Image: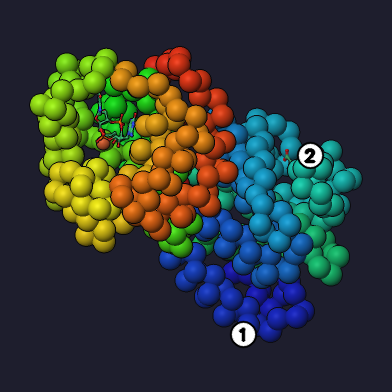
Amino acid sequence: MADLTHGSDRLTAEEKLRLLVDFGTRISSELHLDKLLDIIAQQITQMLDVGRCTIYLKDEAKNELWSKIAQGKGLEHTEIRIPLNSDGFIALVARYGQTINLPNAYDDPRFSVDVDMVTAFRTHATIAVPLKNNSDEVLGVVQASNKSNGTPFDKNDEGLLRLLATLASGSIEIAQLYQEIRVAQLETIYRLAVTAEYRDQQDTRQHLKNISIIAYLLALALGMSKTEAELIKNASPLHDIGKVALADNILLKPGKLTPEEFEIMKSHTIYGGKILEGAHSKVLQMAHKMSLYHHEKWNGSGYPKGLKEEEIPLEARIVTVADVFDALCVFRVYKKAWKTEEALNYIIEESGKSFDPRVVAAFKKIYPSVKRLYAHVSVNQPAHKDASVEKEVS
Ligand code: C2E
Ligand code: SIN
Ligand code: SIN
Ligand code: FE
């Protein structure tokens, strides 16, 4: 057990014990990996009274260690990657599972100045300990650098850092599992959405991506929280899932639909509603409302139910604007691509008719960002059909 009275002279033993308990509590309640790593690094920086703490995690697939290093008061994160088979001391700690303590980093050939160069930091004394799980497997490395009193790290610092690393590794493993589940969920949603749109759209992946980015920006501009906006972003690709139920001769008709055909087309909202009905996850519950109501109009003239104004769920009112703007800006079998300014004008014209005026006002605000998404769309030429799925990690 580490001597907690040592390390920093500024803190009493009691304060350190409180920090330690606090550390355990805070890290066990954070399931989001990036946030968890930030908290761990902050706490270790404070408890060891050092200039910097960096956490590297193994990326088994790439045989690398990676870290996101906070820059400039923690606002920006720079991703650092180190090959696991390198001779640098961080890689050595990960490979051999042993602590390495360098009293003066720049005097040791195992220390690479690369990270310092990227982050504009000058490492003096530095110490790295392995992050091990209960099965003694190395998950990564925790590095602490530059004690504020300028001395090298001693046995007590090492003991404390190893203790904190042990506490941290359990939480990190859990957060990694959660992340894996989240990524798997998003991938599944995305692939499902691609399936629905694969037949009728020329660049499915880009189309879905643009709609979710626009919906996300709209949600933020409307003052929704980041969490809520992310939910909207993740659910929105599914809004047209009901199209899987439509026959090719309607979905792929290279011209105008007859009124009868359009009646059938409208049923994609009902099908989408049925497919997603009764879902348990928040994201699919949201996708359910989006798929059922994304063709409702503010003035009540939409379908399938003819809901109006606030009767239409807000997430659906958001997706409607994103969907129509995107549909106008791209090529379809039945229409050419419009210029983004023309599409913007249409959205504004339809404020209070098709669209919620508040959502249109938000759209005007985000338009400069939206416009950039369509910089590469050509007016007549369909883009190459592409159903590959890009990983979207929240
Ligand atoms: P979509 O192509 O993704 O279009 C989504 C929505 O964008 C449309 O919903 C409509 O509100 C708007 N939109 C798309 N293109 C235009 C346009 O050229 N002018 C105007 N003013 N608005 C446009 P809507 O009308 O309920 O259509 C739903 C879906 O039905 C469309 O999805 C498309 O898959 C299909 N569809 C609609 N009209 C036709 C058509 O004439 N021919 C074919 N083959 N399909 C059509
Ligand atoms: C390395 O181990 O390759 C670099 C790590 C560092 O310089 O901090
Ligand atoms: C639609 O299918 O209804 C319109 C297209 C879309 O919603 O993307
Ligand atoms: Fe639709």
What secondary structure is marked by label 1?
Answer: helix
Q: Nearer the viewer, mark 2 or mark 1?
A: 2
Would you say the residues marked 2 and 1 are in contact, meaning their CB atoms lie under 8 Å apart? no
Occupied quadrant, residue 211: top left
Number of other residues with Cα within 10 Å of mark 1, as a class: few under 14, some 14 to 19, many 20 or more? few
Number of other residues with Cα within 10 Å of mark 2, as a class: few under 14, some 14 to 19, many 20 or more? few
* Residue 240 % position (x, y): 26, 35
* Residue 198 % position (x, y): 30, 22
Q: Is residue 269 above or below residue 48?
A: above
Mark 1 or mark 2, which is nearer the start of the sequence?
1
Left or right of 146? Residue 358 is left
* Residue 303 % position (x, y): 18, 43
Which residue occupies the foreground of this view, 329 or 201?
Answer: 329
Q: Amino acid at mark 2?
A: Asp
Which residue occupies the foreground of this view, 169 or 206?
Answer: 206
Q: CA distance from mark 2 to mark 1?
A: 39 Å
Left or right of 362? Residue 14 is right
Q: Residue at x 26, y 61 (%)?
A: 310
Q: Residue at x 84, y 70 (%)?
A: 149
Q: Residue at x 65, y 32 (%)?
A: 83
Give the quadrant of the N terminus. Answer: bottom right
Which residue occupies the foreground of this view, 388 or 273?
Answer: 273
What secondary structure is marked by label 2?
Answer: helix
Residue occupied by mark 2: 114
For residue 14, which numbered disc appears in the image?
1
Q: Is residue 115 above or below residue 206?
A: below
Say if residue 169 shows up in the picture: no
Image quadrant of ligand 3 equals top left
Q: Mark 2 near ligand 2 (CB under 8 Å)?
A: yes
